[in-house]
Amino acid sequence: MPKAFITGVTGQDGAYLSKFLLAKGYHVIGMIRRSASSDVIGERLRWLGILGQIELVDGDLLDLSSLVRLMHQHQPDEVYNLAAQSFVATSWHQPLLTGQVTGIGAVNVMEALRIAHPQARFYQASSSEMYGKIQQDKQSETTPFYPRSPYAAAKLYAHWMTVNYRESFGLHASAGILFNHESPLRGVEFVTRHITDGVARIKLGLADHLPLGNMDAMRDWGHAADYVQAMWLMLQQDFPDDYVIATGITNSVRTFCDLAFGHVGLNTEDYVRVDKSRLRPAEVDVLLGNPAKAEQKLGWTSTVTLAELAAEMVEADLARLSKSR
Ligand code: NDP
Ligand code: GDP
């Protein structure tokens, strides 16, 4: 039975990747950090019905010794580093923590592998935010980076260190440059889930408006369940490499609102209020990925349209809120 080790197993991607790997017959080991709210920490895994099927072990990206010990003890075939301080807006409030967790934390995992288990295949969760102030209309693996937030700068450091560990130490280390991907399990602080949760609240009479920041920002949004498959495909290749994972279609926050409000028969203009406190010190205006390399080399494609994604998320939020009322 192949063994996979996942950092960030309690997050959106960790949950979908665990489900995918379990279905493929993997033994999945998920690293969780100490929390005073241990009863709710596995909520996403529970939502997918897989909480009891994963071996949960404790460790922290900031604690190198915990990572060395875990690699030594479990000797996984594949290691997926999904853990991060992943919210761009927070990274301006906590730039040092973001650098430590999102940047150096990734190097801690690679160091643990170099010291204790260099045969493992390694996946690093790189991000389209690294393109920031875009240098090409459609971003591919060869597009220059221009990070616009502490989060993006930290991810870029981790990205280049992944390339370095591959070239310097022969680690089978791949980086997926994933464009935004969403699902009913997306954190509610991110814009899509903020919108679908808000739409559901308005529909159920629990709220009368939805506060939003920059509605003109454009993102290339896909479904997380599709994107975790690409992570696995990268680690099945003979040689490690970097891949852009995207749909190749970009849409505005406004369009996502129209899809989500439209799904329940409401109009965006009647409910959205622009809240200036939600604007960012520096904005990434538009992201649009070119997934040609992943399509050709991995045989990967995105399968969910934005309208389908918005509908699934609104329905999930309606069900969640109706149940908790
Ligand atoms: P989430 O924010 O949902 O999950 C982040 C995970 O990291 C959580 O499990 C969290 O644990 C864990 N974590 C945070 N700090 C530490 C730490 N110090 N030690 C150990 N674990 C820690 O992110 P997603 O699932 O959405 O994303 C997965 C990865 O992909 C992230 O690295 C993200 O930056 C990156 N990415 C995501 C994209 C997206 O659109 N979703 C796009 C491109 C890249 P806890 O539950 O305890 O907080
Ligand atoms: P990001 O691409 O990783 O920053 O993902 P987010 O979902 O957090 O933000 C996507 C875009 O939506 C950014 O350009 C934000 O400025 C924009 N946006 C507009 N209003 C909001 C809001 O209320 N919350 C969030 N999170 N983003 C917003």
Image (cartoon, rainbow, N blue to C red):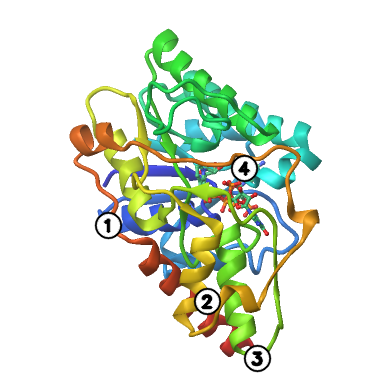
Question: Is residue 322 at least partly visible in the picture?
Answer: yes
The local crowd at label 2, few if under 14, some if 14 to 19, many if 20 or more residues have their Cα within 10 Å, is many
Report the disc number at residue 321: none
Q: Amino acid at mark 2?
A: Phe
Mark nearer the viewer, 1 or 3? 1
Q: 93 left or right of 200?
A: right
Residue shown at 23% from the left, 30% from the top? 237
Q: CA distance from mark 3 to mark 4?
A: 36 Å
Q: Nearer the viewer, residue 122 or 125?
A: 125
Pointer 3 with pointer 4, Cβ within 8 A: no
Specify which label sits upstream in the sequence, 3 or 4.
Answer: 4
Pointer 3 with pointer 2, Cβ within 8 A: no
Query: Which image quadrant for residue 201?
Result: bottom right
Q: CA distance from mark 1 to mark 4?
A: 34 Å
Q: Position of residue 222 (x, y in %)?
A: 40, 54
Mark nearer the viewer, 1 or 4? 1
Q: Is mark 4 within 8 Å of ligand 1?
A: yes
Q: Position of residue 36 (x, y in %)?
A: 75, 60
Q: 54 left or right of 95?
A: left
Q: CA distance from mark 1 to mark 3?
A: 34 Å
When the figure is inspected, residue 307 is found, relative to residue 237, above or below; the finding is below
Name the residue tied to disc 2. Answer: 261
Report the disc number at residue 325: 3
